[in-house]
Amino acid sequence: MIDITLIGTGALQPLPQRALASAAITINGHILLLDCGEGTQSVAKKADVSLMKIDAILLTHYHGDHTYGLPGLLQSIGMAGRTEPITIFGPAGLSENMKPFMMLCPYLPYELRFMELTDENGETAPMALKKLIPAMPDGFMLSHFKTEHRVPSIGYRFELTRLGKFQPQKAKALGVPVNEWKRLQKGETVMVGENAVTPDQVMGEARKGLTVVYTGDTNACESAVNGAKNADLLIAEATYGENEQEETANEHGHMTFSQAAQLAKDAGAGELWLTHYSPMVDDPEAYRENAVGIFENAVCGQDGMKTTLRFEE
Amino acid sequence: MIDITLIGTGALQPLPQRALASAAITINGHILLLDCGEGTQSVAKKADVSLMKIDAILLTHYHGDHTYGLPGLLQSIGMAGRTEPITIFGPAGLSENMKPFMMLCPYLPYELRFMELTDENGETAPMALKKLIPAMPDGFMLSHFKTEHRVPSIGYRFELTRLGKFQPQKAKALGVPVNEWKRLQKGETVMVGENAVTPDQVMGEARKGLTVVYTGDTNACESAVNGAKNADLLIAEATYGENEQEETANEHGHMTFSQAAQLAKDAGAGELWLTHYSPMVDDPEAYRENAVGIFENAVCGQDGMKTTLRFEE
């Protein structure tokens, strides 16, 4: 199960009804925060996203509309008494770009760790991930992909894989005692006398897992399509509403509503949430048909919007 | 005429219904912004306070709940195309404390000027003021006073003085031609033949002006009482609602509602606006009587609250 909360849905400038870019992915009661524009704390509170449960902050790039909420958020978490470390992930330039933020909050009661994702595409090694975010379950995978913006930028892909169904008859045939079945189901290897029995020997074919993808700022590009491949939920930037703004979008490293929809379609996504609206987009719903015409399951994101993805029955 | 807008009324942490400390003083259509906590831009927009008209930002101290809105605000003003300089005023440590903010917005299309107010109490020289904020009218006076917080901190006093009534019979007696009267009324000296006629020769006694005082964070202290002397409107921090929290307030460099009321009373203020509520103060109105019992004209400030002070008829 993955809970997703879209926190802020604005670009460039916070508006009374719209905070700047941010979203929360909640797994096992722990939160991975995506970007942290101004207003993130405030909307998170309203949407019942507990700041205290943030274990990692994943930045797509270092523009102010994705980062200026950081010092306040980090301080509030400190004032609330957190002592467990928090890891900040980000593309090339992480430590340099984090410097001013660290200068603004020098006395945090918890450790801040940094993990720069210098390869443009890649998967965070499970061992490193487990060390940095211990609460994430087995089968959780985090990867990132290059996006095309005016500065180094990446999107994030979250996967919760699902093992196949446990096959009791196979376990019995291999002589595994019933009290060891749970360990196999959890993915552990079990010894039966001198023989090792591995989970794949007693589980059916891996079942469909859950995938959420968050683009950050980007042009329509192949790398984003690959990163978003078969996502159950794709949260994509859609800075401009009008199709006629495509040239402007391309110039500024952004997408229109229809380009975001084309991305979702090309990636074979299940659902698309549009976000990161220009302050000129007064009411995103007014442009929604530009997306729906291309990709039916396109939804206009709003501050505080939530959903839960569950494994199929 | 002075327009006052209370922007954010919160302390420590922004809440969905309450941005962090900030207020705007509008004179002649130009704005002096007091403090700039997270959420300032957003509430300013809602309250029709145009960011583009901010000529100066006056910081009371450098804690995050009074400053973390700065980088976003400065960038938004830049994106909106401002080219005129903005001056940031603040107590001791201004340039050091502004460093990280400047690192966060290195490419502003306008000049930022800094004016550190190192003397704990003092008046900004009219010449310097005119140079930094050219739009402020003659008769505008800015002074600051030491407050007692855990770091160097000051409060601000804004005065719009008012000349006496013009006495036509005196001007006539001195031989000033009627077409020169306006200059005298505006405070200029006029030559009549070889004799200089000064405004004080033709104006009655100076009339009551307008005074607004903003404390920033402070303990109840004599210096704040002096700073707020006879203010028409005193905007005072009132972090804690309960009288029983006085000890906590004293310890942390803050005031309770009743201490703020006592300050207004001791200063002989006309009206008191309470602000800078702890996140624990859910509804300030619930504690208002703690203030009103001491100072009748005590009002609980709210985000976006406005008033206009006008010269008496």
Image (tube, coloured by chain):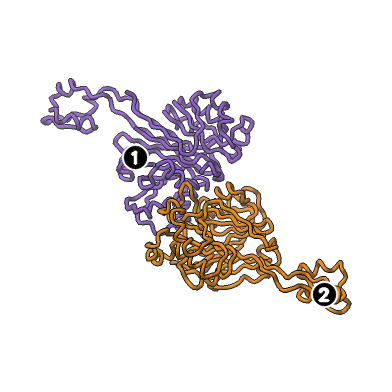
Chain colours: A purple, B orange
Q: Residues within 10 Å of mark 1 (few under 14, many from 20)?
A: few
* Chain for numbered disc 1: A
Question: How would you rate the neighbour count of disc 2 (Cα within 10 Å): few for under 14, some for 14-19, many for 20 or more?
Answer: some
Residue A117 appears in the picture as rendered: no
Give the percent coordinates (x, y) of residue A85. 34, 50
Q: Is residue A200 above or below residue B117?
A: above
How many numbered circles does the render carry?
2
Q: Quadrant of residue A58?
A: top left
Which residue position is annotated with label 1? Answer: A125
- In 3D space, how far apart are the residues under numbered discs 1 and 2 (Cα atoms)? 89 Å
Q: Percent from the top left, x then y, of residue B285?
A: 46, 53
- Who's the residue at 65% across and 54% down the image? B53
Task: Residue B109: tell me if it is visible.
Answer: yes
User: Residue A18: where, in percent of width, then height?
Assistant: 53, 41
Depth check: A267 or B66 in front? B66
Amino acid type at image mark 1? Ala
